[in-house]
Amino acid sequence: MKPTLAVKIVLIILVVECLALTCLSYVFVYYGKRLVFREIEERGKAISGFLAKMSEYPLVAWNPDPLWDSIRAVMLQKDVIGVEVRGNGNELLLHLGTIEHSDEAMIFHRDVLVEAREFVDEEAVIGEMDSNQKKIGVVTVCLSKQKFYENLENLELTVFVLAVCTFWVSAILAVYSVHYFVGRPLKILIRGVEKVSKGDLETEIHISTNDELERVSSAFNSMVRALRRNLEKRIKDAEKSAQEKNLIILGELSSMLIHEVGNMLNRFSVIEYQLGAEKLSEKGRELLDNFAKELKTLMRFTENVQLFAKKPDLKPRSMELVGFLKGIVASFNFMNPKGLNYVLEFDSDKCVLFADEDAVRQVIVNIITNASDASPKGGTVRIGLKQQSDFVTIEVSDQGAGIPDDVKDKIFTPFFTTKGPKGTGLGLYISRSMVEALGGKIYFESYPGKGTTFFIEFPLMTTS
C-alpha cells in the first residue's frame, strides 16, 4: 500500500523533529557539562580558600586545632577525598584523606598568604619576604568527580525524558494537524474529483482552510462549472444540429409530398368552384361551405410547409408601405366571417420600404390571421404603422385571451401551436425567418385577458 500525502508529510515532520531534538539535546548536555564543571571548580576554590584562610600564621605553628576541626568538617562532605597543608618549603604540616592524581578526581591548590608585618619571630618565617605579603604554605583539596558524573547522568536522563515526551506530544499534534488541515481537505477534494470523473458535474466541494487548499477547491468548483456550461452548450448544439438535420430531411420529404398534395388540392379547388356554380340545397350548400373551409386550411398548410422546406428567395425592391397595408386590411374586411373590425392606424401618409413585397405580405397576412383567430366574434384587430428615423414598426393587436406565460418561449419554435389540430406550428417560425432575412426583427407583448400585440420592425431604405 502506497503511503498517502498526509503520511509523507507526517514522516517528514517527524524526521525533522528528531534531528532538531538531537541537536537540542546535544546542546543541553554540552552546556550542562560546562555548568557542572564550573560548579565543581567553584566548590573546590571555595573549600581551598576557606582552609587557606584558616591556615594563616601563627595558627599552624601555635594552635592547629581550629584548622583540624575545619578540615574534619570539610572531609565529612561526600565529594571531598583528601586535604593537606604544606609549608613554604613543601613540608607536610597537616594531612587528612588522600590526594589522588587521576581522572576521577580534581585537585585544587591555594597559597596561604599573610601580611609581612605579622611576623615577629623571624625564625618562623619560611621562604623569602617581599614588601607586602608572605607565603607561608599551600592548601591542597582533592574533590571526587563521582558527584559530577551523577549530576551529568541525571541531566542526560532529564534531557532524554524531555526529548521523548516532546517527540511524542509533537508527533500526536503533527498527526492531528496534518489530518485536519491536509488529509481531510484532500479526501474531500479526491471525492469531488472522483464524482466528476464519473460524470457528476453538479458536484461542488467546500473547503474552508484559508490556505492554498481552499483556493484549489475554488478553482476546482470554477472548473466544474465551466465544464458543465461547456457540456450544456455542446448538448444544445448537438440537439440543434440533429434538429437541423431532421428538418433538412423533413424538408426534402415534404417538398415531394406537398407537390403531390398541392396537385390534388388544386383539382379539389376546381371541383369546389364547379359545385359552387350549381344550384344546391341548403344542406348541400352548408356541406360545400365546410368543404371550402377545410380546403382553404389544407392549402394554407401546404403553402407553409413549402415555405418552411425551402430557403426563401428574396427579391427586395422599393415598396410604399401605407398603400400596401391598406390593401391587406381591405381584403380581410372583405372576407370576414367572424364580423371582425380591422382598423389601420398610421402616423405618416407615405413610408417607403426596400424589401421583398411577397415576403412582407406573407408575414403581415400570417400575423393578422393569427390575431383574427385569437379575437372573439365582433372584436377589433388593430394594425398600426409607426415610422422612426431609421426603421419602421408594424403593430398587430388583438383582443384575445393572451398567450400563457409557460408557452411564451416556445412561440417561435417550429411545429409548436396553440390551435390544436388546425395549427401547423410553422407560421410564426416562417414569419420570424423572413423578417430576420430582411434585416428586421419580430417580438410580442401579451397580457392575460388583454390580448397580444406583435411588433415587426424593418430597417428603412436598406439594400442589404
Image (tube, rainbow, N blue to C red):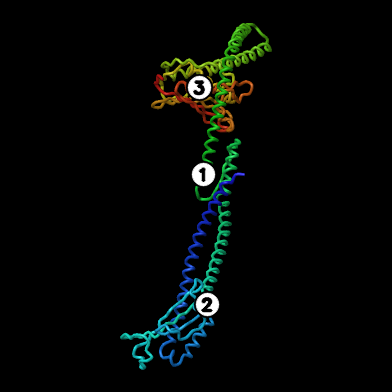
- Residue 49 vs 207, above or below: the answer is below
In which quadrant is the C terminus drawn?
top left
Binning the other alpha carbons within 10 Å of mark 3 as few (below 14), some (14 to 19) or many (20 upward) gives many
- Residue 376, percent from left and from top: 59, 26
- Residue 138 vs 31, above or below: the answer is below
Q: Amino acid at mark 3?
A: Ser
Disc 3/disc 1 C-alpha distance (Å): 47 Å
The residue under label 3 is 433
Residue furthest to the left: 131
Callout 1: SS: helix
- Residue 289, percent from left and from top: 63, 13
- Residue 459, percent from left and from top: 42, 24
The residue under label 1 is 216
Binning the other alpha carbons within 10 Å of mark 2 as few (below 14), some (14 to 19) or many (20 upward) gives some
Residue at the (55%, 69%) spot, across then down: 154
The residue under label 2 is 79
Marked residue nearer the N-terminal end (3 or 1): 1
Callout 2: SS: loop
Mark yes or no: residue 384 visible: no
Marked residue nearer the N-terminal end (1 or 2): 2
Q: Is residue 354 left or right of residue 337?
A: left
* The one of 208 and 360 positioned closer to us in this rendering: 208
